[in-house]
Amino acid sequence: MGLPATAELPSATGPRTSARKSIVLVITSLGSLMVAVDSTIVILALPTMAGDLHAGLSSIIWTILIYLLITATLTTQVGRLGDMLGRSWIYNLGFAIFTLGSVLSGLATDATFLIAARSVQAIGGAMVFAIGGALIADVFPPHERGRAFGFLAFGWSVGAILGILLGGVITSTLGWRYIFFINLPIGVGAVALGLKYLPPSRRSSTQFDFPGFGVFSAALGSLCYGAIEAAAYGADTTNLAFVALGLGLLPLFAWVELRSATPMLDLRGLRQRLLGLSLLAGFLQSLGYLSVVFLLTMYLQGLRGLSPLDASLLLVPGYLVGALTAPWMGRRVDRTGPRVLATLGIVLMMGAVFAYSFLTLTSWLGFVPLISLLSGVGVGTFYPANNTAIMSRATPRTFGSISGLRATLTNLGTLFSFVLSLSIASASVSRPVAEAVFLGTSGLIGNVGAEFLTGIRVALLGSAVILLGAAALSWSRGPDGAEAAAGAVRVGSE
């Protein structure tokens, strides 16, 4: 049965509706930008933070992983919370919590404090990341969502550019703490805008999946802890036991979810071809691609001895092209459908990752920005197309839940992407050398540098293979993707 057109927001057109769309687009793009800034700015500052806080490899890597772990486990539940309590309210609260966590991160006195502060930041980031797509689906009709998601991807790419540039400049001049403090004025401004302008959304009756959330959190926590400790200190009985426990809990999680009336991850929804394949393609894309900047940072700072600023400048062109490509590609998605464009985006990213794997200890560094142009077009093409396909199968009642599911799988892929890359790359050399490279020690030449470069190359080739699988899934969604983008969307209960 279809819901009335006024189920979420008035369907009238005119200046007020256009203004509302513009305001929502600005605020959600700002949220995407802010979260993206933090995703790249921290990576470039890792070596400096580790030295200042006297932290080892395991501790400093957890400043990234704890953020990814918490966002991966919270996003679907936060999306559901938005459906229950109002998406605008949850979005604004998320911005406030993210800003608080940023300030606490800048005040950290040791690695433990920083990890705890990043946990607070992650809670807010999960709220912003999960609800943004739902807010767009609230106010934009199906035939305009591709363009809207294009601007959301634009905000992410601009944020990533700012993160890279500011990470290099701020870390080299003011110090790493200010990479977190810059979020304060952005966060305060965004909350003020959100409280004043974000429209209310209808609340729906649902409930949390506490059993699923508990099993899921335990599985991811065990897997990450065991894998990172093995990468940092070597595999032993304890670390392998944690990995085995995490793997063993995953089937239990699936069993719990399939029997839950309100599952945290609605695995049954994956049986819908367009939704399921689009979600899985997004998961594999993040698994295969989103640790590449981490691997490049190790290559540029650890093996080539570049400063954070110099390394950041080499990575900017790709993000800039992605930012410029995304809105234009979003409009193309509205006309042609997501299938071809999403698949093309993944293929371009796969080609870039494969090209990065040919870098050597003496390669011309200009190859890095040139290759990044290819990946930038891929990112700007894939995200608006795939997000449009996913949200086309959501109903007004489930915008938050589907957006949260998309965000969870993306964060889950990113989390495992870092774990796999770290484990593969560090397995090529001894643990002390791996730690030296990860923490930015320069001058690693000869056999040591060559061995570690081999590890990075293997990790990159593995990422390319994963992206090949993502492209296959993306294409397999079938021609019904175009139908969805053209406006044949299920807006009622299914």
Image (cartoon, helix red, strand yellow):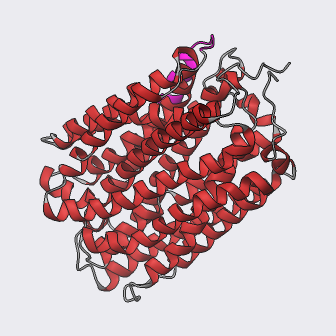
Question: Looking at the picture, how far across and down is residue 68, in whole percent?
Answer: 43, 42
Q: Residue furthest top?
A: 205
For the point 56% across and 29% down, which residue is it?
76
Q: Quadrant of residue 143?
A: top right
Horizontal side, residue 8 vs residue 487: left or right: left
Instruction: Tell me the quarter of the image containing the N terminus.
Output: top right
Q: Is residue 433 above or below residue 101?
A: below
| Magenta residues (range) | 203-218
Is residue 250 at all visible to an observer of this figure? Answer: no
Horizontal side, residue 92 vs residue 439: left or right: right
Q: Quadrant of residue 221?
A: top left
Is residue 444 at all visible to an observer of this figure? Answer: yes
Of residue 395 and residue 324, the one placed in the foreground of this image is 324
Horizontal side, residue 101 vs residue 409: left or right: left
Q: Is residue 316 above or below residue 264?
A: below
For the point 36% across and 31% down, which residue is it?
191
Question: Looking at the picture, how far across and down is residue 434, in whole percent?
Answer: 31, 65
Question: Looking at the picture, how far across and down is residue 234, in whole percent?
Answer: 36, 54
Of residue 460 and residue 474, the one placed in the foreground of this image is 474
Question: Looking at the picture, how far across and down is residue 98, in whole percent?
Answer: 34, 34
For the point 45% across and 35% down, which residue is it?
128
Q: Is residue 226 above or below residue 422?
A: above
Instruction: Tell me the quarter of the image containing the C terminus.
Output: top right
Does residue 216 show up magenta in the picture?
yes
Q: Residue furthest front?
A: 15
- How many dots with numbers? 0
For the point 57% across and 30% down, which residue is it?
249
Does residue 450 show up magenta in the picture?
no
